[in-house]
Image: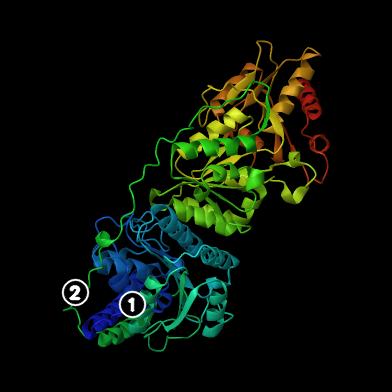
Amino acid sequence: MSYHKPEAKAIQELKDIAHRLRIHSITSTQASKSGHPTSCASIAEIMSVLFFNTLRLNLKFPRDPSSDRFVLSKGHSAPILYAAWAEAGLFPIEDLQNLRKIDSDLEGHPTPRLNFIDVGTGSLGQGVAVAAGMAYVGKNYDKADYRTYVVVGDGESAEGSIWESLHFAGHYKLDNLCVIFDVNRLGQSEPTSLQHQMEVYRKRLDAFGFHALVVDGHDVEELCKAFHEAATTKNKPTAIIAKTYKGKYFPNIEDLENWHGKPLGDKANEVIKHLEGLIVNGAVAGPVAPKSPTKLKQAPVVDITNVKLSSPPNYKLGEQVATRLAYGTALAKIGQNNSRVIALDGDTKNSTFSDKLKHIFPERYIECFIAEQNLVGVAIGAACRDRTIAFVSTFATFFTRAFDQIRMGAISQTNVNFVGSHCGVSIGEDGPSQMGLEDIAMFRAIPGSTVFYPSDAVSCERAVELAANTKGVCFIRTSRPNTAVIYGNDDVLKIGKGRIVKQSPKDQVLLIGAGITLYECLNAAAELEKSGVHARVLDPFTIKPLDAQLIIENGRAVGGRIVVVEDHYQQGGLGEAVLSALAEQRDFVVKHLYVPTVPRSGPPTVLIDLFGISARHVVNAVAAVLKL
């Protein structure tokens, strides 16, 4: 499709809108006495051309699955994003004066509390990954015409996660993705490392497989042409590298340092008067309505509710199966039940067993390679607007690298499911760098999260099924060693409901373990019985929410004596969850066994004993508790 230059009237309208957006950014940050008006000013023309010439938007339903997507990675420029939607007519312009107020959803950085925001942004370096996830779904699953646009600050492009995501987009030839770099030269505290070296940006993006265009970011004609070129480029994503100036058209402020994150104060009226003088059509010409998505090839209607295993677990009691293997089996089963189940992994699929879905549905597996920050961001983007049920897997310890992306996922109200394998010292010879020993603490700290710790194959399959239907961030902790099947195939497991797996009327102590330590508790109970001591054993199934009532009731039944054992560091794991549940209860004594120091390589059974979480240590802990 050939490019048709907009008429002079349309060009002037876009220029006028850009200045109105600048004025809104000034007045709203003046009202809140905080914000980033100069960072807004550098992208005013970009926002004007995007919203009033390029994007296909449905104002009645901002999250229309068939509409174009827009992500503001430089989330501190939120005021101009809000201004664009207000100018488009989504909500009254006067509402912009409520920016950052406690009773307003126009927060300092965008969050999905607003119906026109897909993801929370503001922790810099994450927007490209999310946008790439959206674009991947649009190209490969929805097969619709919507396009994804993301505005990136030049300062945040120093983040390695940006380049992980650019590599991903180039590798998968996401030609429905357009990344706009706002190269305004200035960071928060000093100039950026590259400042206005536009050719350096262009060469880098070209090397990453992008159709890279350098433009004057304040020239609406150049921007109109560049966005048209982006929409017609095939087999490559497009990068529009816009040379801009911070505080553009702000007299005595433009391109000067020490104005980042500051309202204009007593200079505001002078700057607004100057900007009003630049507007040709004044208030007479109303805003140009955004284009409608109705003429696009529509995204299909999808249903991601009520996901079930295609067949129930099929194991024999006592059969030895690793929960990581059961995860792969369950993933394939729910994939057979719902065509929107997808798996993402970071080159560990033959260890996490996410490749079981790939073998059946190769198109529904996304290889993100060894780039965990991008892996998480892509999944968050893929899950936006309820387009997919995303399961992300890697070694549990490697999720720590992407903690910021995970916590921003919670702010973004994401429903992504994370599965961490190879947890604890029980992985053995690979050593401490591969051992997830902080992961429960990390995921427990995520607001609204659900943390599953299945101990056998049956409970792991059910955890996958439950996670697929649970809102918010879910984490499933899977183990490398084989463990015995202890549940029946038709046993019902529920979030927040633990199970007593061994008990008698004579029980004197409650043992709580999960994963491999549940079996250490069972072995210890068997050993204790030889000396006439009876122990009850509890499997929590979910660490968050924890079945506090079950623990309290059974703890009281054995005289308040509890031993908790876990393959995790002391802080933030199962033991501290139990202690927290008992904090307001009287007459309990808790002995907590955990991995006390940085471990080392060795055979799993040797490590479990060496670091104090084997059945032998549980027996000793029981002896100590019974003497108290």
Q: CA distance from mark 1 to mark 2?
A: 16 Å
145 or 572, nearer to the observer: 145
Is 93 above or below relative to 491? below
Q: Nearer the viewer, mark 1 or mark 2?
A: 2
Q: Which mark is residue 22?
A: 1
Residue at image location 61% in from the left, 36% down from the top: 577
In the displayed structure, 8 sits above or below 424; it is below
Name the residue at the top extreme. 505
Q: Residues within 10 Å of mark 1 (few under 14, many from 20)?
A: many
Residue 586 is situated, as x and y percent measured from the top left of the image, at 61, 26
Quadrant where the C terminus is found in the figure: top right
Quick one: SS at disc 2? loop
Label 1 residue SS:
helix
Question: Left or right: 620 with respect to 353?
Answer: right
Q: Position of residue 326 (x, y in %)?
A: 61, 34
Q: Residue at x 80, y 44 (%)?
A: 429
Q: Amino acid at mark 2?
A: Gly
Residue occupying the point 39% across, 53% down: 142
Q: Is residue 457 left or right of residue 90?
A: right
Question: Which disc is residue 286 wearing?
Answer: 2
Task: State whether residue 244 appears in this view.
Answer: no
**Badge 2: how crowded within 10 Å, few (<14), some, or many (20+)?**
few
Query: Residue 552: which quarter of the image?
Result: top right
Q: Are marks 1 and 2 in contact (CB under 8 Å)?
A: no
Horizontal placement of 503 versus 358: left or right? right
As rendered, which of 64 and 524 lies closer to the eye? 64
Q: Position of residue 241 (x, y in %)?
A: 47, 78
Identify residue type, mark 1.
Arg
Among numbered discs 1 and 2, the one appearing first in the sequence? 1
